[in-house]
Amino acid sequence: MISRRDFLKAITAGIAIYPYRNVIASEKKERILNLYNIHTEESLNIQYYYLGRYDINALAEINHFLRCHYTNEVMTMDVELIDLLCDIKDKIGFNREVVIISGYRSRLYNEYLRSIGRKVGVRSLHLIGCAIDFTIPGMSTKEIASIAKSFGKGGVGVYTDFVHIDTGRIRYW
């Protein structure tokens, strides 16, 4: 019979890995992102996956990097989204820099954008860490979007200066 202490330890461990439940297994040996955030002017070059394991500390750094630049709030980003961004980047070129326009967006910032006439969704997936707007220098947004669509995951939106990806239902605009 399992002791109460061991049961509580198992529950605590389960809660800790729950955000990463859909990405426990991956076919890649390593995942590396080279990121630049246009709003904070920060750069991050980080390996967040190696030999079948996600580096929780590296994921925390990515979450901080993708924080809302308006409020500095940090959200746990969907790891499937981070993997999709990495897969898109790798298909274009392993060492390419990804320029982040928007990762997590706080409700306060989302409402501010709406108040100045930006067409952002009231229930945007940016609000829950499931969307990223980005570009890759030297690539057109149409080229990036085409590659993103080839993975058949989530939403892909093409804008003049960036591409939106998310891990919601599959849809394109």
Image (cartoon, rainbow, N blue to C red):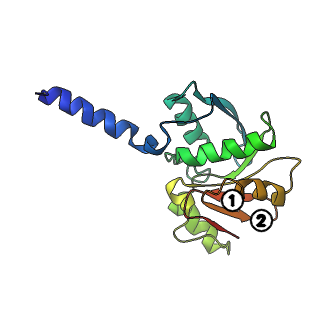
> Separation of disc 2 and disc 1 at Cα?
8 Å
Decide if residue 66 is in sight here.
no
In x, y percent, where is residue 145?
Answer: 76, 58
Question: Residue 164, labelled with which disc?
Answer: 1
Question: Residue 154, labelled with which disc?
Answer: none
Above/below status of 17 relative to 148: above
What residue lies at 70% left-to-right and 38% top-to-bottom?
42
In x, y percent, where is residue 144?
Answer: 79, 54
**Left or right: 138 with respect to 15?**
right
Residue matched to label 2: 159
Tell me the element at label 1. Answer: strand
Give residue 153's quadrant in the image: bottom right
**Left or right: 110 with respect to 144?**
left
Q: Are marks 2 and 1 in contact (CB under 8 Å)?
A: yes
In x, y percent, where is residue 101?
Answer: 71, 53
Give residue 109's quadrant in the image: bottom right
